[in-house]
Amino acid sequence: MADYSYVREDMLPEREPPVSEVGIIGWLRENLFSGWFNSILTILSLMFIYMILAAIVPWLWTPTWGAGSLSECREIIADLGKQHGGACYGVITERWQQLLFGFYPDELRWRPILTFLGLFVALGPVLFSDVFPRKVLWFTGAYLFLAPWLMWGGAIWTPLLVAAGPALGYLAYRFLYGVIGNLGAVIVAVLVPILFWLFLVGPISSGLFSVIPLGLEVVESRLFGGFMLSVWIGVVAIAISLVLGVVLALGRQSDLLIVKYLSVGFIEFIRGVPLITLLFVASTLLNIFMPPGTNFDIILRVMIMATLFASAYIAEVVRGGLAALPRGQYEAADALGLDYWKAQRLIILPQALKISIPGIVSTFIGLFKDTTLVSIIGLLDPIGLTGSIRADANWNGIVWELYGFIALLFFLSCFAMSRYSMWLEKKLRKDHH
């Protein structure tokens, strides 16, 4: 028998991996110093970051939280011996409540705080369905009508009557479905609550309030402002535009020519017009088309325009998700004998929305940041409030501290939305597998 001496007859003992391949050193070598070109880029980037931080951090590090004016801040900074100045945080200490709540009455600020906390409870079963019980969905539905009442106040009968609108539409659909067909019943079911809200809610609520005066103190829209206003407009526009965008996307792919052309016309028109133009229409031109004496709340007008603007972009994102689905999914729904709405609800839309999550969240983040445009039409969002704060003689000339505080608020909100979308994508991918 030949002697194959190059074949090892005993096992080698296990050894630890090289230090240069694992741990922090391994990560640095693989990601930052994997070659001469990457090493040069890493060193140059570190030098650039150091230069930026060396200029910003000393400017940020100042004990000026208790200062009552910009001149007092400068005196504190001068006592520290700083040559290049420093941040004046006294304006944040003094005006942070105004930046958050605008001119909302101090004694009533528990209402927007309660509304904000209720928002998290209402979104819980929608965003984290595995954690929150489905019973909480009842609160989510009620929150849609209670939140505006908490913010604006007025008779308790108004949100109750507004909540009755969809119920009346559903009853109209069930009653007329067998008489005028599905499409006609749907149209009537949409028109009934709209007409009820426009013409009957106000008189009925006033009559009930005169008999049983239950309600909250009314807060006028001109007192709304600050970050609260941006969140309020953003949340309403995001929630409604998602539903409306899905409907428009389905309408654009509909076989009904009228529905298809109306959806296409709406989407293309809205996407071809800047949001600031729509806001100007909401603030000035919309009153021209309303009946004389009509008082259409400016914040409601802005919410409507922001919602319509976002819904057109959401519709295109969802349409991309629908187009990405294999044709076999539609054929499978037909093979199971599902009608159009069941096929969309059970098979098509869940998959299309999962594909569209990054685009939808990007649209939402863009919409939330675009709420700052309302300052151009006179609403006092955080950007709009900076002008009135800087007009104060004590804070005349202060800039970076105010805008930095506002930027931090928006960054935290947008970053949270971004992280949630990434978590949801991973969760849906695991559930799919």
Image (spheres, rainbow, N blue to C red):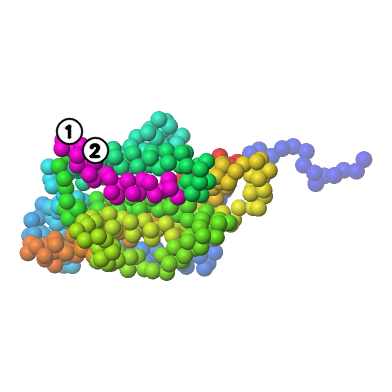
Foreground of the two, 41 or 124? 124
Give the labeled residue for mark 1.
Answer: 212
Quadrant containing the C terminus in the rendered view: top right
In the image, residue 207 lies in the stretch drawn in magenta: yes
Decide if residue 343 is on the left or right side of residue 279.
Answer: right
Q: Marks 2 and 1: CB-CB under 8 Å?
A: yes
User: Could you tell me if residue 362 is visible in this image?
Assistant: no
Residue 280, x across and y down, in percent = 28, 67
Residue 317, x across and y down, in percent = 49, 57
Query: Residue type at mark 1?
Result: Ile
Give the labeled residue for mark 2.
Answer: 157
Quadrant containing the N terminus in the rendered view: top right
Please tell me in which quadrant of the rendered image residue 294 appears.
bottom left
Residue 132, x across and y down, in percent = 41, 33
Residue located 17% across and 55% down the image? 222
For numbered disc 1, what is the local secondary structure?
Answer: loop
- Give me the C-alpha separation between circle 2 and circle 1: 9 Å
Q: Earlier in the sequence, mark 2 or mark 1?
A: 2
For numbered disc 2, what is the local secondary structure?
Answer: helix
**Which residues lie in the magenta part?**
187-215
Residue located 21% across and 56% down the image? 295
In the image, residue 1 lies in the stretch drawn in magenta: no
Residue 104, x across and y down, in percent = 16, 49
User: Could you tell me if residue 133 is visible in this image?
Assistant: yes
Number of other residues with Cα within 10 Å of mark 1, as a class: few under 14, some 14 to 19, many 20 or more: few
Residue located 18% across and 38% down the image? 209
The secondary structure that most of the magenta stretch takes on is: helix
